[in-house]
Image: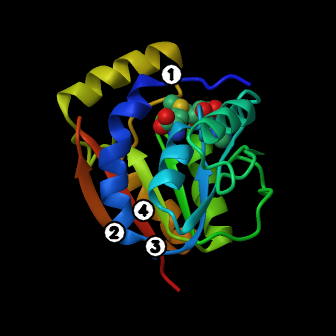
Amino acid sequence: MTARFAPAAERNQQPILDALAPRLPATGHLLEIASGTGQHATWLAQHLPGWTVQPSDLDPDTPASVAAWAQDRGVAARVRPALALDVTDAAWPIDACDAVYCANMIHISPWAATLGLFAGVGRLAAPLFLYGPFRFAGETAPSNLQFEQWLKAKDPRYGVRDVEDLRPLAAEAGLALAEVLPLPANNHLLVWRPTA
Ligand SMILES: C[S@@+](CC[C@H](N)C(=O)[O-])C[C@H]1O[C@@H](n2cnc3c(N)ncnc32)[C@H](O)[C@@H]1O
């Protein structure tokens, strides 16, 4: 099995953990959406000892990479085998979790993925910790605009999403924006919590 490596995941994992950890209870089951290489799933399992982590992605290479990372870092017992999960599917292969974490997906996927993410998290009725670059009422950092140009050259359906466009999706899913946490490199962690 091969552990794939994404340099960005290595750079942002400590700031994400610092923001996430104080907002989680001591124990629980975390669903990660769009796990990619599995670096974040493994890192979170290492540093949240009361939690199990359920990674997932639509990428068929993710399960092997996640398993390799988890083995290497000694947390295989608390990192579940990655699920094949496409957020746009009407049903997800998981019924319950205590929190959902999703990093760097909604700007690198068509808008349908953002719709699917909120709908799916709404079905789980769990808090959503959403990390990445965002617009706020149209505004974002120049570096995010440059990044967006690069993204749109790859696929015009990609783009830095506006938090104001996310709010109605969240409301429909029974979630509301509870906190906006600025993180390094003009990224944010958005905390969405169930309203009921
Ligand atoms: C830039 S990577 C981010 C990986 C990891 N979360 C990180 O921050 O390093 C984007 C990931 O989103 C996943 N993805 C894109 N569309 C998706 C969808 N519809 N459902 C689930 N995952 C999706 C891709 O397969 C890819 O692994």
Q: In the displayed structure, would residue 31 be above or below residue 149?
A: below
Q: Position of residue 148 (x, y in %)?
A: 36, 25
What amino acid is at disc 2?
Pro
In front: label 3 or label 4: 3
Q: Position of residue 120 (x, y in %)?
A: 66, 60
Question: Which residue occupies 77% across, 49% down?
Answer: 89
Tell me residue 124's x, y (percent). 66, 70
Q: Which mark is residue 18?
A: none
Q: Is residue 165 above or below residue 173?
A: above
Q: Which residue is mark 2?
A: 22
* Amino acid identity at mark 1: Pro
Secondary structure under tag 4 reads helix
Labels 4, 2: front one: 2
The residue at which mark 1 appears reads as: 156
> Extreme bottom residue here?
196
| Label whose residue precedes the other's in the sequence (1 or 2) | 2
Q: CA distance from mark 3 to mark 4?
A: 12 Å
What secondary structure is found at the residue carrying circle 1? loop
Mark-to-mark CA distance, 2 and 3? 15 Å
Q: Residues within 10 Å of mark 4 (few under 14, many from 20)?
A: some
Q: CA distance from mark 4 to mark 1?
A: 23 Å
For this view, does 98 lie left or right of residue 134?
right
**Image point 80% across, 56% down: which residue?**
93
Residue at the spot of label 3: 193
Foreground of the two, 173 or 61:
61
Q: Quadrant of residue 185?
A: top left
**In the image, which is nearer the foreground, mark 2 or mark 3?**
2
